[in-house]
Amino acid sequence: MSIIRIFLLIIAATISLQAAKRPNILFIFADDVGQEVLQCYGGQSYQTPHLNELARTGMKFNHAYSMPVCHPSRLTLMSGKYPFRHGKVTWGDYPKNEEAHTFSRYLQKAGYKTAIAGKWQMCLLKDDPLHPSRMGFDQWDLFGWHEGPRFYEPMIYHNGKVRDDTLGHYGPDLYVRSLIEFMKANRERPFLAYYSMAVAHEVTDDLETPVPHGPFGRYDNYAEKVSEMDRAVGRMVAALNALKLRDKTLILFVADNGTPPEIIIRAEGKKLIKVPIVSRRNGQDVPGGKKQLNNAGTNVP
């Protein structure tokens, strides 16, 4: 079953509940991460202890598929429609005729406070800085996609205005901090905290002089980004525990598309073994990663 369809069914069931029973929703959307990356799916190339624990104490989907590139997956998630229906099968702005029908808008109407942090990719925010508001978000901290850095010293739009306090900071830390503060501020009412991760995507900031991912003058490799992804999950779950909201919160972890094929093959110089969904066999790359369709989709956690 499509992971997007599963997610939308869960959201629909959540909206239908009585107000007193409505859970909070922490939705974490990883970037460029396939099933073989996570240890809980049998992967051995990377360490993902916090996601392992989340899988151990929750429900793990073994047959979840997405589109093979990020933009159609994200539009499908927001609209509930397959790409051939919303019309965006590669890249482009979110269809204006679909703006009133996003899952976040429906959650707002059901009494939820909503926030998103990290990656937007529904439009260029410099052209439409209030777009997230029309799409159903009360608060947002989103990096300027193809405008500025997303990792170290990022360019972030906070509720429509560019922040001036990111100097010396790591983008993923700021995105997580934004959502934790949002959860603290709204602990007495149902909320949607949507973390649209920058990791583990490669940098594509289109800058003449690229900014390093980290503060030490170098680019983080894929393994370090996976570690950051897992650490962020741990921080957000710990925040829910500290707020005594864990039992009142539905936590969903999904990825937008599979791992880039070059990462599957290279695996940071390590041999890939025990890959649960077909991604590599006998040392040869086979369909199953980013930009590739396999079994009617790309395998994602």
Image: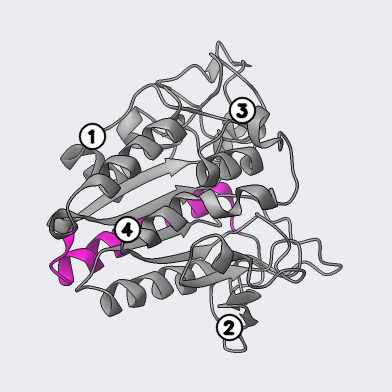
- 3D distance between C-alphas at marks 3 and 4: 45 Å
- In the rendered structure, are the residues bearing label 3 and label 4 in contact, judged by CB atoms less than 8 Å apart? no
- 3D distance between C-alphas at marks 1 and 2: 36 Å
Magenta stretch bounds: 220-246
Quarter that holds the C terminus: top left
- In the rendered structure, are the residues bearing label 2 and label 3 in contact, judged by CB atoms less than 8 Å apart? no
Residue 238 forms part of the magenta stretch = yes
- 3D distance between C-alphas at marks 4 and 1: 25 Å
Give me the disc on residue 286. none
Residue 29 forms part of the magenta stretch = no
Give me the disc on residue 110. 4
Kindly state the secondary structure of the residue where label 1 is placed.
Answer: loop
Q: Residue at image x 16%, y 41%?
A: 57
Residue assigned mark 1: 59
Q: Is residue 301 above or below residue 217?
A: above
N-term mark: 1 or 2: 1
